[in-house]
Amino acid sequence: MKTNVGSIDKILRIGVGLVLIGLAVFHVIGWWGYIGIVPLLTGLFNFCPAYTLLGLNTKGKSAE
């Protein structure tokens, strides 16, 4: 599994994921806020399956 998520992308994904999960936990938004698990995990693992399907890469040239 090659990494395809760059550092800025990673920080944004983790931040958005944590905010969505936090809002769902404190009932500010509905249960759909738990979708924040997806960006959180893709940020932590530096891999986005959708990027692979679309041929995208924010990591740069050395995406190994």
Image: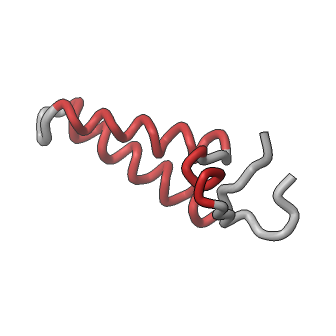
Q: Nearer the viewer, residue 48 or 7?
A: 48
Image quarter (top left, top right, bottom left or bottom right) of the N terminus = top right
Q: Which residue is at 42% across, 35% downward?
A: 37
The type of colouring in the image is secondary structure
Give the percent coordinates (x, y) of residue 36: 37, 41
Give the number of marks.
0
17, above or below 63, in the image: above
Q: Is residue 30 left or right of residue 24?
A: left
Q: Which residue is at 44% across, 52% downward?
A: 15
Give the percent coordinates (x, y) of residue 32: 22, 36
Q: Is residue 59 left or right of residue 24?
A: right
Q: Which residue is at 33% across, 47% downward?
A: 19
Q: Which residue is at 66% across, 40% downward?
A: 45
Give the percent coordinates (x, y) of residue 7: 66, 62
